[in-house]
Amino acid sequence: MYYSNGNYEAFARPLKPEGVDNKTAWLVGSGLASLSAACFLIRDGQMKGENIHILEELKLPGGACDGIQDQQLGFVIRGGREMENHFECLWDLFRSIPSIETPDVSVLDEYYWLNKRDPNYSLMRATQNRGEDAHTDGKFALSDKAAMSIIKLFMTPDKQLYDKKITDVLDPEFFESNFWLYWRTMFAFETWHSALEMKLYIQRFIHHIGGLPDFSALKFTKYNQYESLILPLIRYLEAHNVQFEYDTQVTNVKFEFEGNKKIARQILCIQQGEEKTIELTENDLVFVTNGSCTENSSLGDNYHAPVMNTHPGEGGCWQLWKNIAAQHPDFGHPEKFCSNIEATNWESATVTTLDDRIPPYLQKICKRDPFSGKVVTGGIITVKDSAWMLSYTFNRQPHFKAQPEGQLVGWIYGLFTDVPGNFIKKPMKECTGIEICAEWLYHMGVPEDQIMDLAEHSASTVPCMMPYITAFFMPRAKGDRPNVVPDGCVNFAFIGQFAETIRDTIFTTEYSVRTGMEAAYTLLNIDRGVPEVWGSCYDIRALLDATSKMMDGKKLTEIKLPFGYRMIEKKALEKVEGTIIEEMLKRYNLI
């Protein structure tokens, strides 16, 4: 497997890999990474669909990319997916997946047309004082010290950031900035999370710094991620006769070790309540999604808080990874990610409005008609003075195809689940759906004497507690996440958010698809390049533009470094007068 860029590789079709007709694939889990790997096996590996088996513990595919209509609870989405134009592997995949909404076009075409016609941007990024504009005004509000600490982090080698927290590397003034408000709520970073992942995120999305304050960098699907992304993949795979085996919990993959060779020899599973062993040869390719951010999630309802009765490390995906990791150090260290639920949990809630009483408050804040069928909030709206650090979003409506006319479906989440709210004086994790809705309505400016009535009768709110939702953000070192294909593995790969690939960032759809693509290409020896992570962190234009945006328009000659020096003295600029350097600095408003 190798990386590439450019149209030559992007438009090429690889030759059929040698021996593929004699190979079988077993994919553990049916999340986006697994479904993507299966698609690449078929499209680029030219493997027969009937030779591909997807083993799923639940009765529904999709993993964390969910979106369901529960008969008792109503609509439920545990989270949403923010995407951008340089998800190179994702778009490489979906250019080949037929739309189930529009005949004779791909999912990529459909998505491209939608976001051209209705581009995403926010008209209200943050509020305070119960629905008033927090007036972040598109500014990052970084002090010179804070800005310099970001630059220093950007330049720091990975190995110097192993096992370090964000607070270990960024100046305290950074955490007072609008930049941190935007960043932590958009990506769900906490101060105790990985400094390495923070650095990777800054490098990965440096080309979108200017779009951070108003979300103009983002693109969204027409419906929820399940109906817009997962269902087309399922239809594609079913059309190619891929075998989906539900109610199948894989408990271990047993290996044989021959020198440096690692050969998966058995899959142990419980299928429909009965223990089963699948014997493997070197022609049986095994793909395992190790770990899960949504494992052991629990739902509540209007009148009940979700019960989190998970002990650290519990959950089928985590135990499977532990059982595999116990066989060789190259298989990673799951305990680094799943052993501290207090640090990895947060809570979300799906809110469905039932009548016409709540939507006017939303429209007043987002400044758009939520029933227009177009962008509504344009990304999350963060309540700056919320004790729970509450954010909420309403995407294009209807968010579900089955959504009744006159209803809105939105999503709320809180980063701090263990502190009392501003209106509901209880920790979020102890709150019913009605109480979470009430806290949200309070911050939207609903009169206090009407809040509880609206929360109970004008909305249905389904809270969801996720013990491991930010597990992949925990501080880590080299080797804690196993390589997609560990050294010496001849028929085995890890895929998903806890597999290691270079430069890309977790908690994205791109990461799942990328690991699936790399795994399929490696194990089948597909002779086509995997698109490299977009190289904006090496592009001087992107770096200059990001520098200008982060400094809120200040010039280089105004930035003070430690010890009283300026970033660039005015007399130094005389040396670049009349050169391309001066032209570039002027183009990006740095001088």
Image: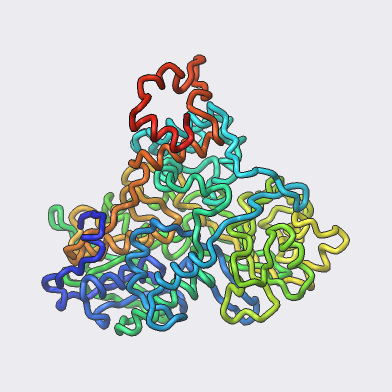
- Tell me where residue 141 appears, x and y as whole percent: 60, 35
Quarter holding the N terminus?
Answer: bottom left
Query: What's the colour scheme?
Result: rainbow
Residue 585 in sight in this render: yes
Residue ID at (40%, 42%): 542
Which sits in the foreground, 108 or 234?
108
The total number of labels drawn is 0
The quarter of the picture where residue 346 lies is bottom right
Which sits in the foreground, 454 or 113?
113
- Tell me where residue 84 appears, x and y as whole percent: 44, 57
The quarter of the picture where residue 255 lies is bottom left
Is residue 400 shown above or below 572? below
Residue ID at (57%, 29%): 143
Is residue 169 shown above or below 444? above
Which sits in the foreground, 441 or 425?
441
**Outermost residue toward the front in this view:** 578
Q: Along the horizontal axis of the image, is 218 left or right of 335?
A: right
Q: Along the horizontal axis of the image, is 158 left or right of 193?
A: left
Q: Along the horizontal axis of the image, is 327 left or right of 136?
A: left
- Tell me where residue 82 appears, x and y as whole percent: 50, 59
Residue 388 in sight in this render: no
- Tell me where residue 342 appears, x and y as whole percent: 57, 49
The quarter of the picture where residue 272 lies is bottom left
Is residue 511 shown above or below 159? below
Residue ID at (49%, 53%): 217
Q: Along the horizontal axis of the image, is 101 left or right of 38?
A: right
Is residue 386 shown above or below 489? above
